[in-house]
Image: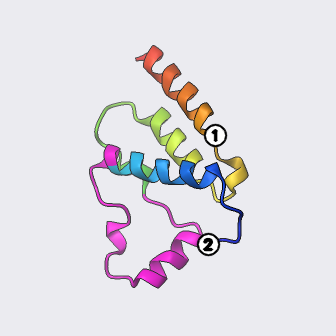
Amino acid sequence: MSGYKYTEKCDVYSFGIVLWEVMSRKPTYSHLSQVSSLELLNRIVEGTRPNPNDLTICENTGPIKDLITQCWHSNPEERPTMRNLLVSFANLLLLA
């Protein structure tokens, strides 16, 4: 929708959104429920993202917040690959 070619990075963005929903236990963009679908879409394209500080499912959410916000980067080329995300999660599990 931003004019970029569809790549794996679109799925990375979606993964970040779903992970935010799981970690926050909130529907995405619920704070914008009074906005029309078209307005919401425009805001997302312009860079509106869910609040990473809403992650409440566990303590020390800093590393997860970082991964999620990397998944949402406005430039798809700056988003991690799914392989990089797997490595990052594996490293997080080793640190836990």
Q: What element carries label 2?
A: loop
For the point 53% across and 40% down, the residue is 66
Assess disc 1: are there few (<14), some (14-19) or many (≥20) residues with their C-alpha within 10 Å of its C-alpha.
some
- N-terminal of the two: label 1 or label 2? 2
Residue 52 image point, x, y percent? 44, 50
Q: Quadrant of residue 83?
A: top right
Residue hosting label 2: 1
For the point 56% across and 34% down, the residue is 85
Residue 46 image point, x, y percent? 60, 72
Q: Residue 7 carries which label?
A: none
Residue hosting label 1: 81
For the point 44% across and 53% down, the residue is 17
Residue 67 image point, x, y percent? 53, 39
Q: Quadrant of residue 3?
A: bottom right
| Residue type at numbered disc 2 | Met
- Start-end of magenta stretch: 22-50
In three-dimensional space, the C-alpha distance between marks 1 and 2, rounded to whole angstroms, equals 20 Å
Q: Is mark 1 on a helix, strand or loop?
A: loop
Q: Is residue 87 left or right of residue 18?
A: right
The one nearer the camera, 60 or 85, is: 85
- Magenta-colored stretch includes residue 40: yes
